[in-house]
Structures are given as C-alpha cells and as structure tokens.
C-alpha cells in the first residue's frame, strides 16, 4: 500500500489506541481557517507581565529580581494540598478526593525569549530545576505523580507569553500515565527490555521518521503521531525519570530541545505554538522498571503559521485523525535549518 496516498490506521503501543491517517485529504480545496500571525518581537521586560522580575503577580505576591530560573507556587492552582472532599459513591456517580501542588517555572527573566531563542546553558538550568522539583515533589509521600509541561502560544491556552512552564503534582496517577505504565510494564515483563528501546532501534534502522539525533537522544515523529508535526525525544539509554540523567545527558537533552524548537520556529517563520511535556514514571513507589523516559511536543499548526489542526467531529466522537503522514512531517522538519530564522 502507498501509505502517502491511502487512508489507514496506525497503532500506538504506549496507549493501545489507534489513529486514523488520511493523507489523500490534503488534496481537498479548503485549506483551513487563517488567523492573524502573533507578533514575534517582545520587549525584554514588560511592566504589565506578572511573570517578569520585580513585578506583582495576579495573586498579589511580588516576584524577586531573579537572574535565571524562578519557581513559585501557582497563585490560581488547579490542585491544592489542603482541605478535603468526602469520598462519595452512588451507583454510577463517584467522587474521590484529589490533592496536589501546582508550580510555575519561569525559564528566563527575559520576557522576549522562547525556548528556541535561549542559550544551551539556560536550558541546562531549566532541566536542573525540573530535576530538583521532581525529586522534591516526588519524595512527598502524598504525591503519586509529577507532571512537568509547557503550553506555548495563545492558541494553546497560554495566557502569558513570558517563557515558562508548569508542574502539577497530585495524589493519584492521571489517565495517560496509567496507560503508559501498564503497557510499558507488560512489555518489559515479557521481553526484558523497554518498549521504547526496541521501538527506537526499529526507527533508527528505518530512518524515515528521524529528524535529528546526538550521542544520547533521538528526536523523531512517532509512527503513531496524532498532531501534524508531533515529535518525541527519546533517550538512547533506558531510564525512568528526568532525575536519572547524568550531567552529560542533561547537556545533550538541552541541545536536542533547542534544536527541535528552532526547527519548529523555522517551519513557518513564526514563534511556533505547542504543548510539550515529560512522560516519566509515577512517584507512588510502585514498580516502574519498564518505564522509558520520553518528552513529547504536540503542536497544532498544520499548513502555515495561521492554519491549525482542530480536534473536532470525528476526532471528538470516534478517534484521532491526521492528514499528512508522519513520514511527510519528519521529512519537512528534517529539511529545516538548525539556525533560528531570526539569526539568519
């Protein structure tokens, strides 16, 4: 079958779910709604930004004059570590208490930057903060999972363009992590190897979806990718969490994140929006030997800086669906320069 022309389904072994791929749809006449391009240039300091150094946040606290990264507890957190909700079960209606801690990480004091425009040593500092926060929050006996993520761009729901990410640490293990724990533990028990180790070996042999790589990490478009230019960074070495990285791997990981975010910006010469996040072991103390750390980017842009992919209709009620194949997306990203378009 010519996969670039015929509809087909692809299986995601991490979640045991399928995605519908419909590459022939790119030939249809309507190419999607266009929107205004976001303004690319911002000042290094914005007096109205509640994340800039020295400014007052929406909750009334004032930020210190931080010189590098800055972490604080979210003023309007989705989870709180106090109070309590009674457990209720009434037929098909169930309620359970959920506690947690939500934090914000400012990647840089410079309001004008994005991850793609930061220096490698600045990203290394961000990773070290991720490590320390995962270690501290995951060591709390009431916390079962620590989710580290970043929403970039207004169309991804990001309310502030200042370079920042979030951490949600909670008392239970969320759905996506539960699925990936189950599938990876089952595979490891059967094979004695991590699922992503075997998957990465197959991808490196085929090369069709590889974007870039270094001695310790590989960035690729997953065979089962849902979003148009979705990517995944996979370490060559099997380890479970960000805290398991050696210093040389921290450096290599920073280089890999910088390169893929630069390529994203170069794709449509715009500050590329995405949701990105770490997928790593839970912290509940259970057996996580099968977990293989990975970092994923889910960007919504499809054909230009103003045309985005919507998850509607069939995607909402039946199954995820994509138009361009993962191989086409990988070839496009691989062809781009690793020098940011603003520096050319």
Image: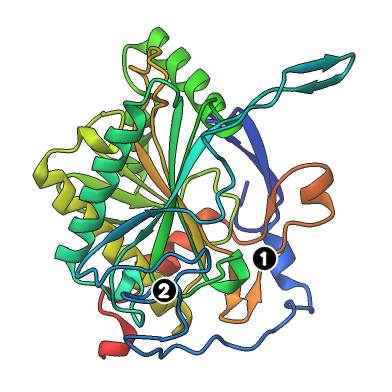
Give the numbered dot on residue 162: 2
Distance from label 2 to label 1 (Cα)?
Answer: 24 Å
Residue lying at the far left in this picture: please name it: 248
Secondary structure of the residue carrying numbered label 2: loop
Taking the image as shown, residue 135 lies to the left or right of residue 181, namely left
Q: Residue at x 25, y 42 (%)?
A: 131
On the image, the x and y values in percent for residue 327 come to: 49, 56
Vertical placement of residue 281 versus 92, above or below = below
Vertical placement of residue 322 versus 66, above or below = above
Give the numbered dot on residue 309: 1
Secondary structure of the residue carrying numbered label 1: loop
Q: Which residue is nearer to you in this view: 245 or 162?
A: 162
Q: Which residue is nearer to you in this view: 228 or 102?
A: 102
Q: Which class describes the residues within 10 Å of circle 2: few (<14), some (14-19), or many (20+)?
A: many
Q: Which of marks 2 and 1 is in front?
A: 2
Residue lying at the far top in this picture: please name it: 190
């Amino acid at each position: 079958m010519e996969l670039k022309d015929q509809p087909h389904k692809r299986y995601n072994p991490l979640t045991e779910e399928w995605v519908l791929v419909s590459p022939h749809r790119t030939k249809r006449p309507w190419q999607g709604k266009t929107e205004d391009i976001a303004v690319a240039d911002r000042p290094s300091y914005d007096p109205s930004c509640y994340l800039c150094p020295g400014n007052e946040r929406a909750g009334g606290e004032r930020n210190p004059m931080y010189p590098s990264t800055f972490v604080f507890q979210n003023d309007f957190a989705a989870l709180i570590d106090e109070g309590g909700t009674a457990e209720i079960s009434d037929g098909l209606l169930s309620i359970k208490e959920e506690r947690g801690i939500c934090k914000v990480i400012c990647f840089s004091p410079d309001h004008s930057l994005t991850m793609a425009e930061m220096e490698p040593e600045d990203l290394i500092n961000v990773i070290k903060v991720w490590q320390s926060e995962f270690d501290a929050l995951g060591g709390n006996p009431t916390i079962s999972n620590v989710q580290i993520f970043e929403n970039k761009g207004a169309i991804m729901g990001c309310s502030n363009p200042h370079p920042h990410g979030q951490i949600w640490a909670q008392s239970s293990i969320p759905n996506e992590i539960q699925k990936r724990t189950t599938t990876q533990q089952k595979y490891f028990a059967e094979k004695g190897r991590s699922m992503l180790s075997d998957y990465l070996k197959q991808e490196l042999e085929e090369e069709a979806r590889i974007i870039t790589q270094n001695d310790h990490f590989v960035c690729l478009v997953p065979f089962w990718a849902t979003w148009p230019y979705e990517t995944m960074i996979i370490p060559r070495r099997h380890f479970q969490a960000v805290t398991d990285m050696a210093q040389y791997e921290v450096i290599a990981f920073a280089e890999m994140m910088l390169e893929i975010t630069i390529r994203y910006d170069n794709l449509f010469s715009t500050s590329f929006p995405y949701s990105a996040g770490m997928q790593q072991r839970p912290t509940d103390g259970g057996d996580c030997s099968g977990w293989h750390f990975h970092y994923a980017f889910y960007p919504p842009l499809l054909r230009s800086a103003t045309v985005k992919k919507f998850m509607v209709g069939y995607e909402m009620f039946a199954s995820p669906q994509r138009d361009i194949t993962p191989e086409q997306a990988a070839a496009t990203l691989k062809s781009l320069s690793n020098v940011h378009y603003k520096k050319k």
